[in-house]
Amino acid sequence: MSNAPSTEDLRIWLIQRVASYLEKDPSDISPSVSLTQYGLDSVYAFVMCGDIEDHLDLRLEPTVAWDYRTIDALADHLTTLVDRRAGGAG
Amino acid sequence: MSDVGTLERMFGDPWDPANPLGHAAAVAADEREEMFGEGERLLDRFVLNAEFVPVEYGGRLTGLDRLVRMMRPVWRRDPCLGLGYGASSFIASVNVWTAGSDEQRRAFARMMLANRKIASVYHELAHGNDFARAEFAATPGPPGTLLLNGRKEVVTNAKRADSLVVFARTSPEEGSRSHSQLFVHKEDLPPGRMTDLPRFRSMGMRGVQLGGLLFEDCPAPADAVLGAPGRGMETALRSFQLTRTALPSMMVGVLDTGLRTAIRFTSGRALYGRTAADIPQVRATLAEAFADLLVCDAFGTVAARAVHLLPGETSVYASLVKYMVSKLLIEAMDRLSLVLGAQFYIREGEHAVFQKLLRDLAVIGFGHAARVACLATVLPQVPQLARRSWPAAAEPPADLFRPDAELPPLPFDALTAAASGRESLSTGPGALLDEHGADPDVRRLAEVFARELAALRDEALALRPRDLGVAATPEALAVPARLAAVLAASACLGVWRHAGDPFLKDPAWVVAALTRLTARIGTGDGRLPAPLAERLLSETLTRYADGRAFDLAGGPIPG
Amino acid sequence: MDALDLDRELGDPADPAAVFSYARCAELDRAEEFPADICRELDRLGLPAHYVPAEAGGALRSYPELIELIRTVSRRDLTVAVAHAKTFLGSVCVWVGGDRAQAERLAAKVVSGVPASWGLTERGHGSDLLAGEVGATPAAGPRGGYVLTGEKWLINNATRGGLLSVLARTDPQGGPRGFSVLLVDKGELPEGSYRLLPKVPTHGIRGADISGIAFLGAPLPAGALVGRPGGGLELVLKSLQLTRTVCAGLSLGAADQALRQAEEFTARRVLYGGPLVRMPHVRRTLGESYAARFVAEAVTLAAARAVHALPEEMSVVSAVTKAFVPARIDELIFACGELLGTRAFLTEVHDHGIFQKLSRDHRVVSIFDGNAAVNENVIVDHFPALVRGYREGAADRDGLGRALDLSRPLDAPDPARLTLRSRLGCGLVQDLRAAVARLPAGPAVTALAAELLEACDEVHDEMSRLAPSVRDVPARAFALAQRYELCFAGAAAVGLWAANPGWRDEIWLESGLSYVLARLRPGTRRRGEVFDRLYEAAGRDGGHE
Ligand SMILES: Cc1cc2nc3c(=O)[nH]c(=O)nc-3n(C[C@H](O)[C@H](O)[C@H](O)COP(=O)(O)OP(=O)(O)OC[C@H]3O[C@@H](n4cnc5c(N)ncnc54)[C@H](O)[C@@H]3O)c2cc1C
Ligand SMILES: Cc1cc2nc3c(=O)[nH]c(=O)nc-3n(C[C@H](O)[C@H](O)[C@H](O)COP(=O)(O)OP(=O)(O)OC[C@H]3O[C@@H](n4cnc5c(N)ncnc54)[C@H](O)[C@@H]3O)c2cc1C
């Protein structure tokens, strides 16, 4: 895993995903607003979890987006997981 | 002895009008809108509750499929007992095994084994299926307590239960970490803070005591919370995997009696100089009901075994069992009602049990969760399933399909709120096609379902994110609905391939089962050709004459 | 009085103070009590006259109107409709087969509000009319007449009815000429010559008087005989052609109420942050239910007008109507019930528990007055004639035109033209090829109509390949009869739409045909968005009641 994504990369990627779920422009999505406020309910959390898993090749709890409720929080959490994996592998 | 046969024998011959545990008595209790008292006393003697308690806590719960089989004799006789004595405590219990502390589990087990009732308290009329918006609140009170406020409605046994498992909001925030389940004992509550609402009357399940509860600043011990606070939603979703699988599957017992009643009526009814049971159209209807019953049992049994063997996958199976089995059972009973004609419509006489069963069964469609809500649970997982699992490489373990094979204990910890895109049951049709020498009719049908899975994969990959939530189109919802048929077909194929029993090994039933299922994916009308219908009917009538159940196990039953 | 007048006169059913209110019906159902006050109100408003042909002194001039009246009552409550309209069934044998004086005598009684009931069924015998055991033997003595013995059971209004048309065995050998219809006036029977059987508790229509009557050597005057001696079976089978058509009104009324319940609930119920009707699957279900009701209406309307215009074909037409309409409406009720969830199950929480009541009540429509199997058997018996007629494109075009063109006045119905077996087959279906060829519709409907024709060809091909079987009619034949019903339904929708420009917007035909084809050809996957458009269009037309 030479070029693991940075928190910023992840944030941008997540903004794009969320924008696509909502069929909105990425510039309308704020990473500090809770996802439920955008109307992304428990159901979308599972969709998002699957997309993240595919993107990062990670196994996640399906409820990850229930616990990290903003894009910022998720991006931070995912970075930790990616770093931990990189550390563990290295 | 605490096996199915013993319970059947204790209930005795349901058709004997003098049997205080028979159909006549159950119908009479229904007419009085009372629980079937004699039946409840029998189940107390049998300590049916022990079936809901894992062995390590002193009960008899070893496997979910066994539990389902144990409950069938109850549902065969009286769904009000099935729900009002059995299933409602079972639903409550699963939350405790899934999320409770050791101490809470022990307390629960003690109560169950003492024949007490514990109510499962989720529902609020204002929010129905949308229980994430439940308003019933538990907020911090004086040290060591929570204050409960709000109402819960249409709850089985609300009044007579000694304890409650209550779904409550523990945080005002939106989202899925704002609820908790509380395990509350009524004796711990101060008087006057919890009141019973008047009973709710219903057209079916008329004996079941549907109540409601109003809490007003009612303190409860803070340690009543099951698991970590805020985890209520997740616990619910994990628990549903047992309940959505097991409940519809228990209700197969209802169709057993329904079919038996129809055979009883038609074989005694003189019509055009012979009996109604000689009319080919009637025979086809009976045979098709039997085929549907086998489909329901195969799908339910395999899904129940999957909870043990493939717990990471069962969030898909459970909801689809509920979706599919409920419809198959309701429709089979509806068709049988037309065979019974006027005898279905009257509430007295030998066949009166049928109309009661039909009314009681209706709850399978919406109770606990609406059928379409079950589809909505699976839908968001579908694109991932398509990406990661279809067509899957690895077949599920053979023990999934062998009802007699030993199972590992129920892995409550391994249940997940969603399946992470993994699902292996749908490999059934594809795997069969890889086999040489398979029966040509089975092959032909397996191909139909393999093609269906391929089509589903393409459609699933084309779903847009907005199709997956409340704005889901009917076409999007049809994807999990059709998946349910593929999975049911896979379950039947699996049971057939691994069967030892001469009837279950014979291709006839699986061909009939898959033919029936083609109607669910729009590739056929589901009607059985006459020779096949006759083959199934002859098994049905043999079992009827020999006093054996119509399900996969086909065990002896009295009467 | 037409249906709208009746509805207006009855007042707002949601007003608990109205005699015929939802609240009152719910209360009566719980108590399993007969809706006597409501029936009296219907009598006061003159409804019974509509069960009596104009020639006999009543107000029945049009079967479509009679059906709309029954639909209006059924929409409020099926128990009341079944209890009241039974009088039409109880007297129909006299309208079909009685002499003038008999008809006028009966007419006077019916118009004055005496309920009449119809006794065909016996405890041991339902569909098999020839197995009936109730016997009538000639009375000794110069005045003639009969002595009636035996039990009719499961008879609507047997207890409350003043009059009873009884199918009785007049030849101990039985057989098709061994039965006669006798009109029994209970008021004239000597005490002790009959016994009423207790009310039978039922799944639905719980307040109705479903009971029976045992005749203990009851003496009847010679004038009790309706039609010819030994002509009873024929008379009953012809009369059933009328009653089976009229029963569709019960189903349409139930459909109206089920849809009203579903519309109102889904509009008000808030789930997941918005009204339920916001969910696409809910709108789809509603749209598809509108289509189902439209198709059922088309079948009923064509059949009701055929009573006047094509009586010779009623043996097929009535069987199709009775087999098709109640079954489709049972499905519609289930679909609407799935939207209501618990509120379709609880009896007191939502709108007086109307929904759970109607779902129980309506199931009887598929059972009584000839169940689906019996009617489909009649269709199967006609297969050879239907195939022949279809291949020849044979039709009584004048009669068909009058049946379909709603602007043309209806001739007085002529029961003498009813026959047990339609020699002409069924002109509506047999004319489909021509009707499709001249259908003035847009491309979508034209394509659907062409597909309907293709499916009809297939169905008739299969019908032609079926070996005739009188006794052991194979299950496959019943499946084909069901497909034939769909052909009829499609043809009725096409026929009515084409004959009546401006009758309904084209979207109705498009969705009606889509509904029919989805069932006729289940193997073809089709898009359901037409039902979404229908839902929107119905809203614009004020069709969401
Ligand atoms: C006999 C009986 C026993 C019961 N026992 C208990 C008990 O012990 N404990 C308890 O808590 N509750 C109990 N209930 C309540 C029961 O669980 C609720 O009735 C059930 O949750 C359904 O809610 P609802 O009918 O209000 O439907 P609503 O939520 O109002 O749903 C109405 C309709 O909306 C649609 N819909 C709902 N959700 C979705 C979705 N996600 N996606 C698409 N469409 C959707 C469906 O068409 C549904 O039918 C019982 C009910 C009965 C009748
Ligand atoms: C509420 C209620 C009110 C009623 N009111 C009246 C009334 O006012 N007057 C009256 O005379 N009767 C009345 N009936 C009786 C009703 O008309 C009979 O129920 C009906 O004729 C059918 O008879 P059955 O239900 O006894 O079925 P059966 O005739 O015994 O038939 C049993 C089954 O055999 C099958 N079957 C029958 N015939 C065929 C066939 N040809 N081909 C294939 N399958 C077949 C069907 O599946 C049927 O359900 C009433 C019934 C009810 C429930």
Image (cartoon, coloured by chain):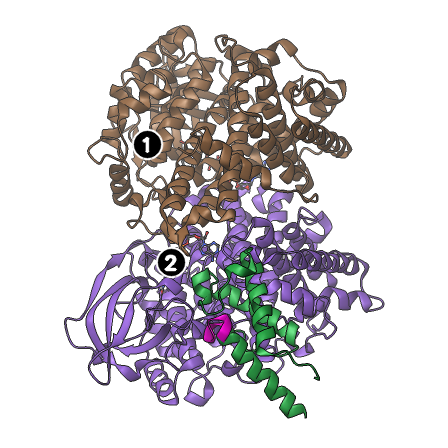
Residue C298 horizontal/vertical position (percent): 54, 25
Find disc 2 in the rendering and name its residue: B128
Q: Is mark 1 within 8 Å of ligand 2?
A: no
- Above or below, B529 against B457 in this view is above
Of all chains in the rendering, the one displayed in green is A
Amino acid tagged 2? Gly
Foreground residue among B320 and A61: A61
Alpha carbon separation for disc pair 1 and 2: 33 Å
Residue B474 lies within the magenta run: no
Residue B332 horizontal/vertical position (percent): 55, 52
Chain under disc 2: B
- Dot 2 falls on a residue whose secondary structure is loop
- Above or below, C329 against C246 in this view is below
- Looking at the image, can residue B76 be seen? yes
Find disc 1 in the rendering and name its residue: C80
- Above or below, B5 against A40 in this view is below
Looking at the rendering, the quadrant in which ligand 1 lies is: bottom left
Graded by Cα atoms within 10 Å as few (under 14), some (14 to 19) or many (20 or more), the crowding at tag 2 reads many
Main SS, magenta residues: helix
Amino acid tagged 1? Val
- Left or right, residue C404 beside residue C455: left
Residue A10 horizontal/vertical position (percent): 59, 74
Q: Quadrant of residue C62?
A: top left
Of all chains in the rendering, the one displayed in purple is B
- Dot 1 falls on a residue whose secondary structure is helix
* Residue numbers of the magenta segment: A65-72
- Left or right, residue B140 beside residue A57: left
Of all chains in the rendering, the one displayed in brown is C
Q: Are marks 1 and 2 on the same chain?
A: no
Q: Which residue does the image show at 36% across and 56% down from the upper left? A: B27
